[in-house]
Image: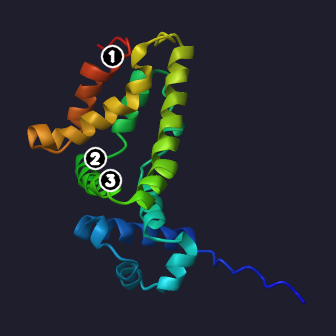
Amino acid sequence: MAEAAPPRRSRLTPEREAELYEAVLDLLREVGYDALTMDAVAARTRSSKATLYRQWGGKAELVVKALRHGKPARTDEIDTGTLRGDLHALVALEDDCTVERNAALMRGVAMAIHQNPDLRQAFREQLVEPEMAEFRRMLQRAVGRGEIRPDCPALDFLLHMLVGGFATRTLLDDQPPTRTFLTSYLDAVVLPALGVPTP
């Protein structure tokens, strides 16, 4: 008796995939993670729910893939020759409107992460761990160039500092993070903590 063939996974075009991810991000901004349903995504994107589950397995995976897709560039694609240049280039990838929209989106997802283990696991595996690995490579380049001492105690806290400045801007100042704020924060807090001189 022949074995049953594994279920076929249809291939979406990159354009169609990008359209689906953008719709997911729009829904997240509108209703938040908990109220977002696969039915709503299917209706918004004129897809079948079965297709969504076949492609992504569930809501958590789809949301995290959409967030990953929405990132402007990979950190390891930036190499200006200096750590300060790399971090400033990272901030310059998005305009203030996009930064504000993404900050609001991440605040909503951060709340849901605490209550949804599947979202927390997918977020950690597909966003946090790759991001930390990319920042470690960026820092190792800076160490190799002699910009940072290899035993600098702040090396392990770069991502914590960046997320902290980004996430607490609205909480403490009642203002969205802007490129000007983030650039100043890098020069006043992050780079001095790493022992990198700033102008």
Q: Any mark on residue 114, and which?
A: 3
Q: Quadrant of residue 36?
A: bottom left
Q: Is residue 124 left or right of residue 33?
A: right
Q: Any mark on residue 193, and which?
A: 1
| Foreground: disc 3 or disc 1 | 3
Q: Residue furthest right?
A: 1
Q: Nearer the viewer, residue 94 or 171?
A: 171
Mark before the other along the chain sequence, 3 or 1: 3
Q: Quadrant of residue 166?
A: top left
Q: Is residue 63 left or right of residue 175?
A: right
On screen, residue 8 above or below 175: below
Which residue: 23% across, 26% down? 184
Label 2 Cα crowd, 10 Å radius (few <14 / some 14-19 / many 20+)? few
Which residue: 49% across, 24% down? 139
Which residue: 50% across, 42% down? 129
Question: Percent x, y for residue 143?
Answer: 52, 15
On screen, residue 23 above or below 68: below
Which residue: 15% across, 43% down? 170
Tell me the residue that label 2 is attached to.
95
